[in-house]
Amino acid sequence: MSLRYLGGRLLGTVVTLLGVAVVVFVVLRALPGDTITAKLGTESANLDAGQLAALRHFYGLDRPLPLQFFSWLGGVLTGNLGVSLDTGTPVSTLVAGALPVTVELAVLAMLIATPIGVLAGMLAAGRPGRLRDLSVQGADCSGSRCRSSCWPRCVSPRWPRFSRTSRIPAHMSR
């Protein structure tokens, strides 16, 4: 792999993450209400204008949106995810508390899925284009993780059949 390729991939990743950050920020701001109504609920209607202005200043809601975005992005990049409105504890502490269980669940899922996937792949590769191969492909397509490259094989009326000698799809070898 060339350095130019890796640089392009890294740049694409940064642009994608920045795009996701912008979308998340805009969607959160487009929701009805704000942090104050989320925290206080219907009690926020009982606040006078001075209290509401003080809370908006405390949460930074009185600043322009670009400033709010870069402040939020800077916090995320430095690990400051804010404070939970429910418990008052830092969100990074809550995430760190849930991380061991999440990692354990992910490792367990991989330990279960990897042998099943390898066995199914071996079964399918043993007789390409036959019922066993098509069954494994169909099970893969009907699973919850459907790759975009898989769907055309599942929905196409001309499901590719492999010839016994050339391993080229029959409809391409004519």
Image: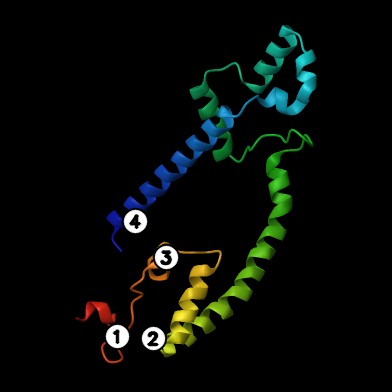
Say few, some or many: other residues with alpha carbon within 10 Å of mark 3 (under 14 / 14 to 19 / 20 or more).
some
Using residue 5 as the reference point, say whether residue 37 is left or right of it.
Answer: right
Say few, some or many: other residues with alpha carbon within 10 Å of mark 1 (under 14 / 14 to 19 / 20 or more).
few
Residue depicted at x 33% and y 73%: 158
Which residue bears the numbered disc 4? 6
**Whole-Å distance between the Cαs marked 1 and 2?**
8 Å
Work out whether mark 4 precedes mark 1 in sequence or the reverse, and give the earlier one.
4
The numbered disc on residue 79 is none
**Whole-Å distance between the Cαs marked 4 and 1?**
34 Å
Using residue 154 as the reference point, say whether residue 73 is left or right of it.
Answer: right
Residue depicted at x 52% and y 18%: 64
Residue 43 % position (x, y): 80, 20
Check contact, mark 4 vs mark 2: CB within 8 A.
Answer: no
**Whole-Å distance between the Cαs marked 4 and 2?**
35 Å
Residue depicted at x 53% and y 77%: 117
Using residue 1 as the reference point, say whether residue 124 is left or right of it.
Answer: right
Which residue bears the numbered disc 2? 128
Residue depicted at x 57% and y 80%: 115
Say few, some or many: other residues with alpha carbon within 10 Å of mark 2 (under 14 / 14 to 19 / 20 or more).
some
